[in-house]
Image (cartoon, rainbow, N blue to C red):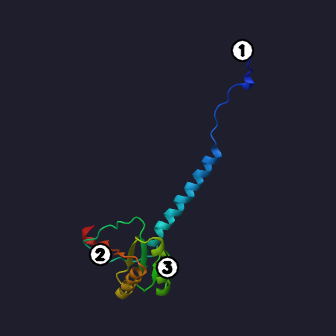
Amino acid sequence: MSFSSESTGRSQPILPMAGMVDMLFLLLVFFMTVSVFREQDKQIDISLPGTQTATAAKSKTPIIVTVTEKGDVYIGDRQYQMTALQTIMIKLAQQFPNETVVVRGDKGAPFGLAVQVMDVARAAGLNNISIATSKLQSEL
């Protein structure tokens, strides 16, 4: 004979679904934002010079500076003049002191401008500077 009633029986454990749904949405927003910023540097259409000895960059999150054929300088999708570029490079060097700077220069871009961009990066304290190239068509 049992004196316990059915209503006072043990209840089943309940998982808090609201917190899990919140975390799911936060992760979704985070990955969508990160994927957009990774592709921004490739939105500016340039033709990279070809080379036979190209190697992949070792840094996972380089600072990418694009120099167009017209002589415009971009970081991401934002255009900068040399004085503003120098200011932003100093800030980036303070925040990310050992980061790689990759200069994506169009093959028709003025060479002197690409050298100026590299000089600005080095003067800001960023010493790991690379030039982006593509594989030659004969090797693809």
Q: Residue at x 33, y 74 (%)?
A: 133
Q: Position of residue 73 (x, y in %)?
A: 45, 82
Indicate left or right for 69 with 87 as reference: left
Quadrant of the image for the C terminus?
A: bottom left
Q: Residue at x 38, y 74 (%)?
A: 102
Looking at the image, which is closer to me, 77 or 119?
Answer: 119
Instruction: Check disc 2 and report the residue beneath it.
Output: 50
Classify residue 13 by image quadrant: top right
Disc 2 to disc 3: CB gap under 8 Å: no
Looking at the image, which is closer to me, 19 or 74?
Answer: 19
Q: Position of residue 95 (x, y in %)?
A: 48, 71
Instruction: Give whichever of discs 2 and 3 has the lower sequence position.
Output: 2
Indicate left or right for 111 with 31 as reference: left
Indicate left or right for 81 with 54 as reference: right
Amino acid on which the number 1 mark rests in the picture: Ser
Mark 2, secondary structure of its residue: strand
Q: Residue at x 49, y 79 (%)?
A: 88
Instruction: Check disc 1 and report the residue beneath it.
Output: 2
Of badges 2 and 3, nearer the viewer stands 3
Q: Position of residue 58 (x, y in %)?
A: 35, 65
Instruction: Check disc 3 and report the residue beneath it.
Output: 88
**What is the CA distance from the residue labelled 1 to the residue labelled 2?**
86 Å
Of badges 1 and 2, nearer the viewer stands 1
